[in-house]
């Protein structure tokens, strides 16, 4: 679990997402040079986003209907808003934690292992953890390369949970509508990540864990743990 200093650093990277949606190669928000996290090899100088062949599990494109990840397999599914809602709806009867993240976001990468740990720790009590990547395709990538890059990170984290990728065509490099996609379509406050949504067993959104871009205040990961334990006990 990252410390308080790591949690506070979320603010700057949350703002970074807003800028990256319009100018992905802007200095100071380098999607082409993500900060390496444990279990993830840093990109090479020659090619910041090398093509990575998936090591396990297919990448499945399912705009609407989608299935949960197979037990023990690391898979990635491309979905739209309806597909995302379908995945959450299939977890009815469970408490659901959704982690919105991106490979270039250092705080996201730091907090991702904790989300996986929570899923393992509380699985028998009825917790389901879902990851949603909102990575963007830069000028040097095609769609398959972006999928492989995201999948490579998930494999390094042993993320055998449902892993989703929002439609990359809506978040293409230079797409001025990317902010609206992230903020409006998926209800991510200010477009800032990491962003967590917590649903109760009836499928109702119980709470969001967000970065307050006006005050600079960030959520403490311990708040997520406490909220999950409370819902599981109900």
Image: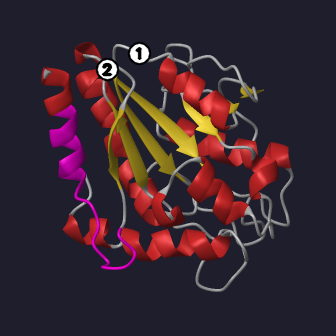
Q: Quadrant of residue 17?
A: bottom right
Q: Position of residue 102 (x, y in %)?
A: 56, 55
Do the CB atoms of the residues marked 2 and 1 lie less than 8 Å apart?
yes
Classify residue 95 as left or right of residue 149.
left
Q: Looking at the image, which residue is at 19% across and 39% down?
A: 227
Residue at mark 1? 92
Question: Toward the viewer: 130 or 200?
Answer: 200
Q: Quadrant of residue 120?
A: top left
Q: Is residue 228 magenta?
A: yes
Residue at mark 2? 201
Q: Quadrant of the C terminus?
A: top left
Q: Looking at the image, which residue is at 50% across and 55% down?
A: 188
Q: Position of residue 103 (x, y in %)?
A: 57, 56
Q: Residue furthest bottom?
A: 27
Classify residue 146 as left or right of residue 132.
right
Callout 2 secondary element? loop
The boundaries of the magenta stretch are: 212-229
């Amino acid at each position: 679990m990252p410390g308080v200093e790591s949690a506070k650093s979320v603010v700057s990277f949350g703002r970074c997402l807003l800028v990256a949606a319009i100018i992905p190669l802007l200095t100071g928000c380098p999607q082409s040079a993500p900060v390496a996290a444990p279990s993830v090899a840093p990109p090479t100088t020659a090619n910041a986003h090398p093509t990575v062949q998936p090591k396990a599990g297919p990448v499945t494109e399912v705009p609407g209907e989608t299935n949960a990840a197979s037990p023990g397999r690391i898979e990635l599914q491309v979905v739209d808003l309806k597909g995302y809602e379908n995945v959450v709806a299939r977890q009815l009867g469970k408490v659901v934690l959704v982690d919105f993240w991106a490979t270039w976001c250092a705080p996201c990468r730091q907090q991702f292992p904790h989300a996986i740990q929570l899923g393992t720790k509380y699985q028998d009590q009825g917790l389901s953890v879902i990851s949603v990547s909102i990575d963007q395709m830069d000028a040097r990538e095609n769609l398959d390369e972006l999928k492989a890059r995201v999948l490579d990170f998930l494999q390094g984290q042993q993320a055998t949970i449902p892993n989703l990728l929002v439609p990359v065509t809506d978040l293409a490099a230079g797409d001025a509508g990317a902010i609206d996609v992230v903020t409006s379509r998926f209800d991510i406050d200010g477009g800032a990540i990491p962003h967590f949504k917590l649903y109760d067993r009836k499928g109702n959104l119980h709470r969001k864990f967000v970065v307050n871009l006006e005050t600079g205040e960030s959520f403490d990961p311990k708040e997520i743990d406490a909220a999950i334990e409370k819902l599981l006990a109900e």
